[in-house]
Amino acid sequence: CVCVSLCMCETDASSVFVVFITSEYIRKCADCGAEDNCHAEFSYAVQRKGVQKVVAVVMEPGLKDTTKWRGPIGLRLNG
């Protein structure tokens, strides 16, 4: 997919990766697997940048508690 390829090129060229945390993004990363673009871009960014270069922007008040984050998002960014 051109969109995923472009995202990955932009990720490689960036200093940090900004992820906008929503319940839908967490769900897609956790439940949809590698076939999903959200899962693919997050996994790629963590692999290429490391978690120290991932900036999480919480978009929903109910997600301010990072213990509610599950799947790859919770595994990599909770803490």
Image (spheres, rainbow, N blue to C red):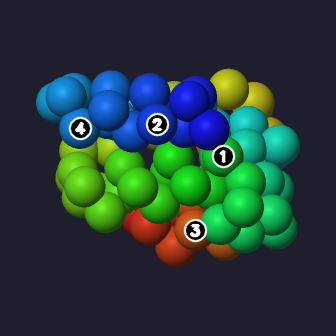
36 to 5, vertically: above or below:
below
Q: Position of residue 24 (x, y in %)?
A: 83, 43
- Crowding at label 3, few (<14), some or many (≥20) Cα neighbours within 10 Å? many
Q: Which three-letter amino acid code belongs to the residue tagged 1? A: Asn
User: Is residue 26 something one can see in this rendering?
Assistant: no
Query: Which is nearer the eye, 73 or 28?
Result: 28
Give the mark nearer the N terminus: 4 vs 1: 4
Q: Position of residue 33 (x, y in %)?
A: 72, 69
Q: Nearer the viewer, mark 3 or mark 1?
A: 1
On the image, numbered disc 1 is attached to which residue? Answer: 37
Q: Nearer the viewer, mark 4 or mark 2?
A: 2
CB under 8 Å between discs 4 and 2: no
CB under 8 Å between discs 4 and 3: no
CB under 8 Å between discs 2 and 1: no
Give the mark nearer the N terminus: 3 vs 1: 1
Residue 5: which disc?
2
Q: Position of residue 25 (x, y in %)?
A: 73, 44
Give the mark nearer the N terminus: 4 vs 2: 2
Residue ID at (65%, 46%): 38
Q: Position of residue 76 (x, y in %)?
A: 44, 67
User: Is residue 49 something one can see in this rendering?
Assistant: yes
Residue ID at (75%, 30%): 60
On the image, numbered disc 3 is attached to which residue? Answer: 72
In space, the residues marked 3 and 1 are separated at their CA atoms by 14 Å
Q: Secondary structure at mark 4?
A: helix
Give the mark nearer the N terminus: 2 vs 3: 2
On the image, numbered disc 4 is attached to which residue? Answer: 12
Give the mark nearer the N terminus: 4 vs 3: 4
Q: Which three-letter amino acid code belongs to the residue tagged 3? A: Pro
Q: Which three-letter amino acid code belongs to the residue tagged 4? A: Asp
In space, the residues marked 4 and 3 are separated at their CA atoms by 20 Å
Q: Secondary structure at mark 3?
A: helix
